[in-house]
Amino acid sequence: MNLLKHLTELLGPEKVTANETILEHHSKDESYFEPVLPDVVAFPESKEDVQKIVAFAKENKIPVVPFGVGSGLEGHAIPVHKGISVDFSQMNQIVELRAEDLIVKVQPGVTRLQLNHELNKHGLFFPVDPGADATIGGMTATNASGTQAVRYGVMKDQILDLEVVLADGRIIHTGTLAKKSSSGYHLNSLFAGSEGTLGLFTEITLKLHGIPESIMAARACFPTVKQCVEAAVSILSAGIPIARMELVDDRSIAQVNLFSGTVFPEEPSLFLEFHGNEAGNEADAQFVYDLFEEHECQEFTFEKDSLKRAQLWKARHDLSYAFRHSDPKLETIGTDVCVPISKLPEMVEYARTRIEKHGFDGAVLGHIGDGNFHTLVLFDPKDKEQVQKTSLLNEEIVEFAFTLGGSCTGEHGVGLGKIKYQRQEHGEALDVMAGIKHMLDPDNILNPGKLLPVETKATV
Amino acid sequence: MNLLKHLTELLGPEKVTANETILEHHSKDESYFEPVLPDVVAFPESKEDVQKIVAFAKENKIPVVPFGVGSGLEGHAIPVHKGISVDFSQMNQIVELRAEDLIVKVQPGVTRLQLNHELNKHGLFFPVDPGADATIGGMTATNASGTQAVRYGVMKDQILDLEVVLADGRIIHTGTLAKKSSSGYHLNSLFAGSEGTLGLFTEITLKLHGIPESIMAARACFPTVKQCVEAAVSILSAGIPIARMELVDDRSIAQVNLFSGTVFPEEPSLFLEFHGNEAGNEADAQFVYDLFEEHECQEFTFEKDSLKRAQLWKARHDLSYAFRHSDPKLETIGTDVCVPISKLPEMVEYARTRIEKHGFDGAVLGHIGDGNFHTLVLFDPKDKEQVQKTSLLNEEIVEFAFTLGGSCTGEHGVGLGKIKYQRQEHGEALDVMAGIKHMLDPDNILNPGKLLPVETKATV
């Protein structure tokens, strides 16, 4: 069938295209997975447009794959079974800001920086920062988190309500404007993190936070990565409400200095941030300093100045980009495991040992306040042995995380890359998940090939 | 069939009873709903026992109703269709405490105070406190919250993993030990708050928190309830991380003084608590004091002494009990709406006006930091006009909360009492909920008659 023709009739010519450059842009994300061109790209401007697209897709059993800005790391937006890529860039309005309620309602195409730019005018901010300037829709779909989750929680924790177009065209609301509710089954967290496989979001209502009176950042260097991690664990055990706590190993610092022109000491480091009032932050920072002394901290530098602070976090955010774009011939592949915090030292040690063992140039970094960290290794996608080794490395790290009671993905999501670990992580709960998918999308038109392994199809 | 005989054969005589006194104990909770005796009460001692009970119930299509300590307020534990009341009091072990990971694994029959008694030895605490010494299983099933939710979140936010016996006897785990995960659909929050209708919990793994270095409590009086609420809203807007913020109106204070022998001024009051380090708490408290001045605060008293602080919170916790047991001829009925915080002043005003209009003796109190409050009215259950009026009052308050974008229940759950509001609150999302229920429990043996309205049965 002529998809372009039919969708153009349905939506109007300005909202549908099969232009080769645009198809190509929607064929990939920031992952290493093989691009696949969609048949067409649709640019809905309203929930009614989304409804029309989904109804058409259902009638004709055509895959529908939502697309934000393509900053995902696990292939979520790649239309592996082709069909319609639904680009939300034309649904990028902040629908309603209720500053006095600490609530905002946005369309899914609003990006993180766009939102915070608006919120900051009101003394408010939205804390989830996956690094990339992702869309709120994409962040919701993958249950993103990032550097401030240790204090403010992950994406699903911020959601008050989702307006969702289901596969059968119904529009539901998963919540209300109330900050808490014990009414009905809690659907917010079921749809958040569902990666476009249960429905398409058309409006997202989020909790907001007041910008703290005082923000203080610090950088601490340790002799070894293990000592960094142990120092981090000691902060959490002491109950200090740290707002950010990032591990950046020596290899990462070298890369960031190269990429960002910074001159940070190339030692295993923690980047920290405290949010509160000035007296409280100073007391917390002093306590942290004392704790770090016990872990042989070699340097502890405050970045009180807001410009210096911004530089610190920009360097951190640019890190994975700095690796990914360091050499056009090389690709990067990362892991995203999350383990109980006391197991972090051995988990990180294990990851570093395996990277070395396989002879990779790679780094360890991440959100260790949550027990979540990433390994990033550079490899040549044309070198078969290297490709095999990256795959083996991934498996080794995920398997080790499982033995510690952890998860294969703390924040990047399943997409294509973590499907093979779903049965092992979830056991029979995977069949419950497959049952929910089957109930809501019996024809499997919503982002098919993602999140659930094919084997689970048979069990529902 | 002879249920007692069959279950006794299955589980052994010490785990099953049809003793009249025990049946009667399992026929009711703290709500005003008509008691219904179960056919038998089972006391499982292991997940295998629970599995056996559920398998037997499924085969014979007999209702299974979980029971904690019967402290629920919406009739969740009442076996309205009779069958087996499953009492978890023999599954009350703390299975594993991993202090260094801030994780504990418990059986569902562990109570809140039992847990905190153990945790406190390790400098840790579990923050969810619904007032009653409820079981962790019951608190999970209703997604309980209470006074500290404003800072630490509600029950579902604390859950890392649930071991659940499904209606078909399968045992699943809804999570892992990782603090965050983007793997699969997020089932923790689907089962938390499901009120025994989707499965029976046999183990619950929770996040813990370090006891803060400094805890400071305060009491503030205002000329009117409206000013109390406005003062509370101003704290939240300023981004102060208040740990507790309770509204207790003048009528409530009078009752608590009577019941607890306290001598608090009988004025509309806020009870507050700050958690952090001493310097930070003092700075926050000073800021709060300044904000309160603008709202004509008449008295601001610190309770720094831990005994005085304990007395303050005991008085608050005993409040609803103080009303409920004030006169043996009278019953209480409460509402539990939750609305956006800026709407609280008008919502609370409305509730007070309606209580007066109907001529009830009643109070307004609650967790206003979350936008959640309760009205409590005393009524004579034998007086038909009064009973009708309580019902009308409930409806008026819920309806008004809906017009403000709120929820009919912030923390008590649906049970029997809020079923009639489910369609209005959730719209078509209710059919998704019913679909999930139908998929997991097609014979409707798990706590039938709760949470979902009967009409939704037909739509799946």
Image: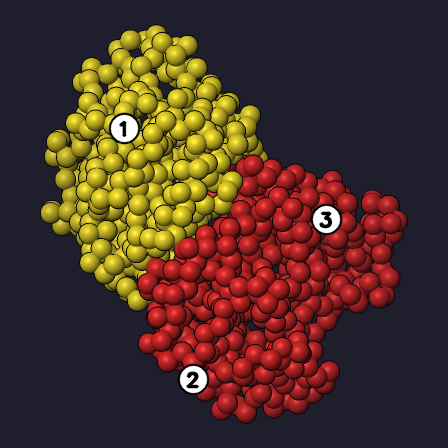
Chain colours: A yellow, B red
Q: Which residue is drawn at 40% across and 29% down?
A: A297
**Residue position marked by numbered label 2 in the rendering:** B223
**Residue position marked by numbered label 3 in the rendering:** B92
Local crowd size for mark 2, using a 10 Å CA cut-off: few (<14), some (14–19), many (≥20): some
Callout 3 amino acid: Asn
Q: Alpha-carbon distance for marks 1 and 3?
A: 47 Å
Q: How far across and how far down the image is residue A239, in percent?
A: 49, 45
Local crowd size for mark 1, using a 10 Å CA cut-off: few (<14), some (14–19), many (≥20): many
Local crowd size for mark 3, using a 10 Å CA cut-off: few (<14), some (14–19), many (≥20): some
Q: In this view, does A458 lie to the left or right of A71?
A: right
Q: How far across and how far down the image is residue A279, in percent?
A: 36, 53
Q: In which quarter of the image is the N terminus of chain B?
A: bottom right
**Whether labels 2 and 1 share one chain:** no
Q: Residue at x 38, y 38 (%)?
A: A245
In the rendered structure, the residue with mark 2 lies on which chain? Answer: B
Examine the rendering and report whether any part of residue A50 can be seen. no
In the rendered structure, the residue with mark 3 lies on which chain? Answer: B
Q: How far across and how far down the image is residue A126, in percent?
A: 30, 51
**Residue position marked by numbered label 1 in the rendering:** A320
**Whether labels 1 and 3 share one chain:** no
Q: Residue at x 46, y 20 (%)?
A: A349
Examine the rendering and report whether any part of residue B107 can be seen. yes
Q: Alpha-carbon distance for marks 2 and 1?
A: 56 Å
Q: Decide which of B83, A28 is in the foreground and name it.
A: A28
Tag 1, which secondary structure? Answer: helix
Q: Are marks 1 and 3 in contact (CB under 8 Å)?
A: no
Q: Alpha-carbon distance for marks 3 and 2?
A: 46 Å
Q: How far across and how far down the image is residue A238, in percent?
A: 50, 42
Callout 2 amino acid: Pro
